[in-house]
Amino acid sequence: MSVETQKETLGFQTEVKQLLHLMIHSLYSNKEIFLRELISNASDAVDKLRFEALAKPELLEGGAELKIRVSFDKDAKTVTLEDNGIGMSRDDAVTHLGTIAKSGTADFMKHLSGDQKKDSHLIGQFGVGFYSAFIVADKVDVFSRRAGLAASEGVHWSSKGEGEFEIATVEKADRGTRIVLHLKSGEDEFADGWRLRNIIKKYSDHIALPIELPKEVAAVEGEEKPAVEWETVNRASALWTRPRTEVKDEEYQEFYKHVAHDFENPLSWSHNKVEGKLEYTSLLYVPTRAPFDLYQREAPKGLKLYVQRVFVMDQAESFLPLYLRFIKGVVDSNDLSLNVSREILQKDPIIDSMKSALTKRVLDMLEKLAKNEPEQYQGFWKNFGQVMKEGPAEDFANKEKIAGLLRFASTQGNDGEQVVGLADYLARAKEGQDKIYYLTGETYAQVKNSPHLEVFRKKGIEVLLLTDRIDEWLMSYLNDFDGKSFVDVARGDLDLGNLDSEEDKKAAEEVAKSKEGLVERLKTALGDSVAQVRVSHRLTDSPAILAIGEQDLGLQMRQILEASGQKVPDSKPIFEFNPAHPLIEKLDNEQSDERFGDLSHILFDQAALAAGDSLKDPAAYVRRLNKLLVELSV
Ligand code: ADP
Ligand code: MG
């Protein structure tokens, strides 16, 4: 062993310790994936080297034949992986193998319950990576040298996977990384050529560079041990360059885990080769589960970009809109230049047309999934629905297509589950119904019982129930779907169009006429609190409701804006009362102006409460109500 200098012992970041613990205890039934992860890293390291060498050919240091070698020692119980990729400097090793750079990691780790069964599925959301080496090894040595650094600037990283690791500077003749796994007792099965070959074929066949194993050469007695011969065990060609029909599902799945750094299989994928004015190949995946950092600004997003098979950049964001940021995969272009940068990508018109084509591919893939595998699509919606709801605002051109992919809860007995698509809604709409009705609110329980729904219940008309924070904002971008406009049932003067018969309308008009006096009296009593008072024809059980003005902000938007410290224009609600309700009849017959005033304010405040709003003057409400209660009991 060469001389080690500047030896130090450092502690792992807390999150690494937690991850190590979780991993060792949740992946014991799937141990062999450690090899997939280490090979995936080696392949990434080679990709990076190949790319950097375009500008600095000297980085190749004469060794241009890029590959990964896996070897083993049965007696020493070790497995060794070696790559001649970009390598790591001492600092790189300390950061990359001692901390987790993903933002939001600490928060994520707080979700761990300590119950290993429950926590084990979280590992999938997190990804496993380098630390998976400790599933099978009780000591890991990493020897590495960053390409371009002197041989004397190699690094030796070593750890038992407990609380700390050692780091030292060593001599390393070749660039790249060598990882030595000292297998735990009981894990020596991995120090075996046959076993390693099978694992590589199973998980890493798609890796585009050769993965070599030593050839089994029978020792001849009395002769010197022959020099090791190596043979390539994987297919070693870029998967996306192969024709679709020749790639097996399992291969697509393993390739996904490599590009997406995910642990689970993808839900769906779409592989396409485009020829003509633009030439590119894309392989796009929909993950099964949302990553834990889906809502983190700095979270990785975008595709892996290759130009003529050469890796150019990770997370090329310019190829898909932000609301599709969960899509993973690669795009390989023949038109871009190898020295393309993020800045150039943002301006290049080629990128614009690729972006709209790729966006359409993704939406088509989702449509297909929704149509052919509705249950799987439901799973997708649970994970990514919130993000899809950002779509209509961001992607005007595809608004209708995105709208078709949205799923909502509704009054049609789905317990608040978002399962109703707009096409289903329209397909079972009432004869003559030419609107899509919806109601927004804070919680499902609140909207489900909203007085605004009374007339719809009576007539058996389905109403979409929207309770996600983003919903009201989303609906401000959706005007219609399939030629039918959206109507907020809590807004404006509800017009049921053809759903009300001529007789109904006539009767309503007559009632309204007969209550003109009451309307005037209420206007005077409620004064400044209301924009308007009118007779309602949407109530069957409740005495009164508050409707929002056609142009006014809804409650949800108002609350969001207020919470963010913005000044919100004061808008007054419309007070609608139910002429058939006994309380209203009582009110109409009330002689005392004082009591009339108290009762109308109570009705107003109750309507606000039922809408999920807070009262402007709760004490006054309580005072008035108590006054009435006292009068009642004497
Ligand atoms: P990920 O691959 O998702 O980034 P990993 O835990 O697998 O996470 O690896 C952590 C980091 O360690 C990598 O991002 C890379 O910077 C570094 N690394 C791991 N293996 C190698 C290697 N063989 N060559 C160079 N760098 C490596
Ligand atoms: Mg990795």
Image (spheres, rainbow, N blue to C red):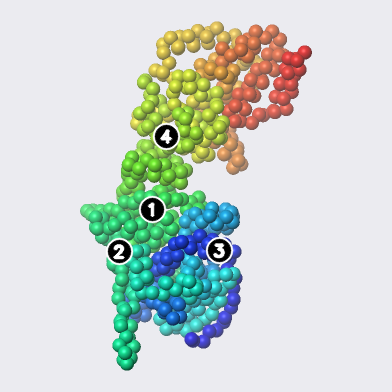
Kindly identify which residue carries mark 1: 266
Estimate the spatial distance between the alpha carbons at disc 2 and disc 3, rounded to whole Å: 35 Å
Kindly identify which residue carries mark 4: 420
Estimate the spatial distance between the alpha carbons at disc 3 and disc 4, rounded to whole Å: 41 Å
Q: Residue at x 39, y 22 (%)?
A: 430
Estimate the spatial distance between the alpha carbons at disc 2 and disc 4, rounded to whole Å: 40 Å
Position of residue 327 measured from the top left corner of the image (x, y, whole percent): 39, 52
Q: Earlier in the sequence, mark 3 or mark 1?
A: 3
Check disc 4: other Cα within 10 Å, few if <14, some if 14-19, many if 20+. some
Position of residue 536 measured from the top left corner of the image (x, y, whole percent): 53, 17
| Front position among marks 2 and 3 | 3
Q: Earlier in the sequence, mark 2 or mark 4?
A: 2
| Front position among marks 3 and 1 | 3
User: Is the residue under label 2 in contact with that under label 1 (CB below 8 Å)?
Assistant: no
Secondary structure beneath disc 2?
Answer: loop
- Residue at the left extreme, as displayed: 276
Estimate the spatial distance between the alpha carbons at disc 1 and disc 4, rounded to whole Å: 24 Å
Estimate the spatial distance between the alpha carbons at disc 1 and disc 2, rounded to whole Å: 19 Å
Amino acid beneath label 1 = Pro
Amino acid beneath label 4 = Val
Amino acid beneath label 2 = Ala
Q: Residue at x 30, y 64 (%)?
A: 238
Kindly identify which residue carries mark 3: 21
Kindly identify which residue carries mark 2: 238
What is the number of the mark on residue 177? none
Kindly tell me whether mark 3's CB lies below 8 Å from ligand 1: no
Secondary structure beneath disc 1?
Answer: strand
